[in-house]
Amino acid sequence: MRACGLYHCPSAMIPTPETLVQTLSAHPDYRVLRRLKARTQLASPPGHSLHRGVIVDTETTGLDARKDKIIEIGMIVFDYDPVTGQPVQVSGTYGGLEDPGFSLAPETIRLTGITDALVAGQHFDDAALTALLSDTRLVIAHNAAFDRPFLEKRLPIFSDFPWGCSMMDIDWEAEGINSRKLDYLAFRQGFFFDAHRAGEDCQALLEILSLPLPLSTQPGLKPILDRLPQKSYTLSALNSPFSTKDLLKERQYRWNGERKCWMRTLESETALKKEMEWLKTAIYGGKTATVEIDERDARMRFSLRSGNTRACTL
């Protein structure tokens, strides 16, 4: 017999971690999180051909793609079932650092753990990145509106693909999840990981897209695939009266300082028509007014490049 905490028990009776996990998981008062272990095989191959997608994440020197730079790229190439939306297997990965040419801000170092010493003299392998993107049908990021402008600036090949966004293209609230942060989504799906490094974030997102969603039970990738054929419409309320700014804020418009107007993105043509009717009545008081509509498909969504923009009279 040997000491085991406050009790004496044979070593053979010490429960294994897996036994403890199973016991706690079966109890309604506990929720067990496992550390993410990267998987290369995610599901059994179906009896038909697979499509190829890429998950990408960046760490940057700041938030403005026009002036800031990428210091880390993580990428996972995976094959998926186009019918069910189930990721099946990993077919390639990339992880690299790049020296931005100037010292990193303390806040950047704190958030990412990347230091000047880590990036000194480093450069992305453009040829390797380009090769991994061959045969790709889809690029996914967890915040595509952030990552896409940076990547298009540094590697223009990213302009050639349809993009999906796991943060915006999945209705997380309908799945009973009220936060879209990646580490919280991982928690709700039963695992944790070392966040804020590009490679680990990509692995976590692939796991989330591979697991069944809590309520619909479809793979997380499926609603992103379903969203691809749809267009989005960014509506610009030109020359709106200053007195209506609070109404526009409540309606989820955002102020564009460069264009000096309020803007909102709608996800369907039906929603666009209803919004134009609301603008005419609530903002322009029934008077004739001109708005702009920027129409985008998956090849243009989340990009800073101009889409198909047209003026429309209300």
Image: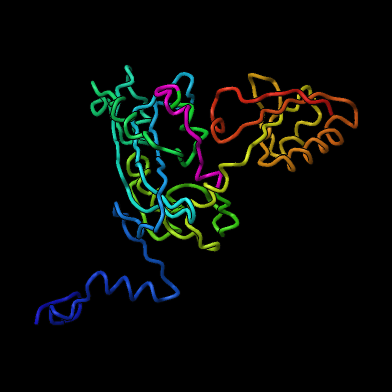
Q: Is residue 148 above or below residue 11?
A: above
Quarter-of-image position of residue 56: top left
Quarter-of-image position of residue 311: top right
Quarter-of-image position of residue 199: top left
Q: Residue 201 vs residue 290: left or right?
A: left
Q: Nearer the viewer, residue 302 or 298?
A: 298
Q: Residue at x 28, y 29 (%)?
A: 128
Q: At which x and y percent is residue 196?
A: 37, 40
Which stretch is magenta? 153-169
**Residue that protrudes farthest toward the right in the picture:** 286
Q: Is residue 165 magenta?
A: yes
Q: At which x and y percent is residue 240?
A: 79, 26
Q: Quadrant of the N terminus?
A: bottom left
Q: At which x and y percent is residue 60?
A: 39, 29
Q: Nearer the viewer, residue 238 or 50?
A: 50
Q: Is residue 254 above or below residue 172?
A: above
Q: Is residue 307 magenta?
A: no
Q: Residue at x 62, y 32 (%)?
A: 296
**Residue that protrudes farthest toward the front in the picture:** 48
